[in-house]
Image (tube, rainbow, N blue to C red):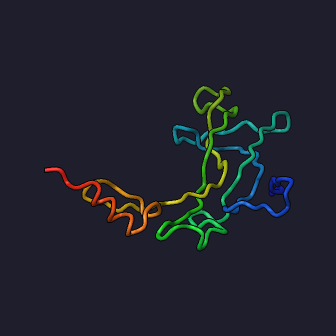
Amino acid sequence: MAISSRKSGDLDEDTVCKQQSRIFYPRAAVNENDQWAFVVNDVDYIQTVMAEICEDEDEPCRFLDGALPWDVTSKCRQKFAYKRLLALHPNKKKTYTDAFRFPSCCICYVKKPFIMTRTRAIEVGDKTPAQTSSVRQRNPRKP
């Protein structure tokens, strides 16, 4: 079930990674030990999970085209969080609480390339080629 996105008071604001809010009523999920478990969800006991799902995962972040320094790339990635829910133990036939992994948000990551010089690493986005050569001259190799 889709619900509307959370909006701030400013109508001209938007996120750089598109995401969709969803509400789940899980009946089974994978726990933090990568094992499937049945989640308690019935008429008398309802457990809900709010999830934020990336719509364009692994795609470049929106609105950054041409705004980033040379050779710096961006990418939207799904983040996850653990939520504790009441589950059915597979062997003991009783309930217990367990942590289950659900999508929590979509984040824009920026990747900065590095250039190795003889003296130290320099981030390409921080120095121009002229500044890079002056760093080499100020930091000559030690014998």
Instruction: Specify the quadrant that holds the N terminus.
Output: bottom right
The one of 8 and 103 positioned closer to us in this rendering: 8
The one of 53 and 15 positioned closer to us in this rendering: 15
Residue at image position (62%, 35%) is 99
Give the side of residue 50 with respect to residue 70, left or right.
right
Taking the view exactly as shown, the residue that stands out farthest to the bottom is 66
Percent from the top left, x then y, of residue 115?
A: 35, 62
The one of 103 and 18 positioned closer to us in this rendering: 18
Percent from the top left, x then y, of residue 94?
A: 66, 26
Give the side of residue 138 with respect to residue 129, left or right.
left
Percent from the top left, x then y, of residue 57?
A: 60, 63
The one of 47 and 120 positioned closer to us in this rendering: 120
Residue at image position (60%, 26%) is 92
Residue at image position (13%, 50%) is 143
Give the side of residue 74 with respect to residue 135, left or right.
right
Could you say which quadrant of the image residue 20 lies in? bottom right
Residue at image position (62%, 42%) is 81
Q: Is residue 58 above or below residue 100?
A: below
Could you say which quadrant of the image residue 53 lies in? bottom right
Percent from the top left, x then y, of residue 29?
A: 63, 44
Exactly how many numbered labels are in the figure?
A: 0
